[in-house]
Amino acid sequence: MKLVLVTAVEEYQKDVLSIFKKANIENFSSSDIDGYKNVPTILKASSWFSSEKSGNESILFFSFTEKEKIDGLFVFIEEFNKNLKTNNPLKAIVLPIERFI
């Protein structure tokens, strides 16, 4: 059993759901989050509200699942990221689970 976490900008939510389905990961959860990137100082200075930090509406998906399904998930995520026209790739990590009930 492993824990997989996937982050995406909100506009890719349907794509991530489709990828989870293709990877046969049927049980998962999601949560809305704000995503941030470090912006170069020149861009900050040109902003009307340069002292304010603003995040991108993003979403976090997570699932406790088997390694084999996660391997497939990563293949589909890599494929998706290769065809992106933006600088907002899907990100994924896997954490081992030592104990669970």
Image: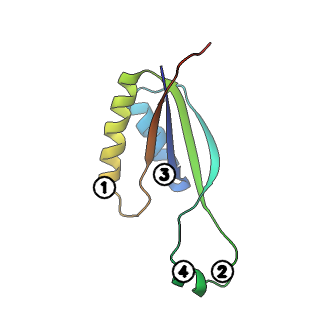
Query: Which is in the foreground here, disc 4 or disc 2?
Result: 4
- Residue 96 x, y percent position in the rendering: 48, 26
- Reply above or below: 64 against 46: above
**Which of marks 2 and 1 precedes in the sequence?**
2
Query: Which is in the foreground here, disc 1 or disc 2?
Result: 2
- What kind of residue is marked 4? Thr
In space, the residues marked 1 and 2 are separated at their CA atoms by 33 Å
The reply to whether dot 4 and dot 3 touch (C-beta < 8 Å) is no
Q: Which residue is mark 1?
A: 83
- Residue 97 x, y percent position in the rendering: 52, 22
Query: Which is in the foreground here, disc 4 or disc 1?
Result: 4
In space, the residues marked 4 and 2 are separated at their CA atoms by 9 Å
- What kind of residue is marked 1? Asn
In space, the residues marked 3 and 1 are separated at their CA atoms by 13 Å
What residue is drawn where x is 53% and y is 19%? 98
The reply to whether dot 3 and dot 1 touch (C-beta < 8 Å) is no
Q: Which residue is mark 2?
A: 50
The reply to whether dot 4 and dot 1 touch (C-beta < 8 Å) is no
In space, the residues marked 4 and 3 are separated at their CA atoms by 28 Å
**Which of marks 1 and 4 precedes in the sequence?**
4
Secondary structure of residue under mark 3: helix
Q: Which residue is mark 3?
A: 12
Secondary structure of residue under mark 4: helix
> Closest to the observer: 33 or 1?
1
Q: Which residue is mark 4?
A: 41
**Which of marks 1 and 3 precedes in the sequence?**
3
- Reply above or below: 98 against 23: above
What residue is drawn where x is 35% and y is 23%? 68
- What kind of residue is marked 2? Ser
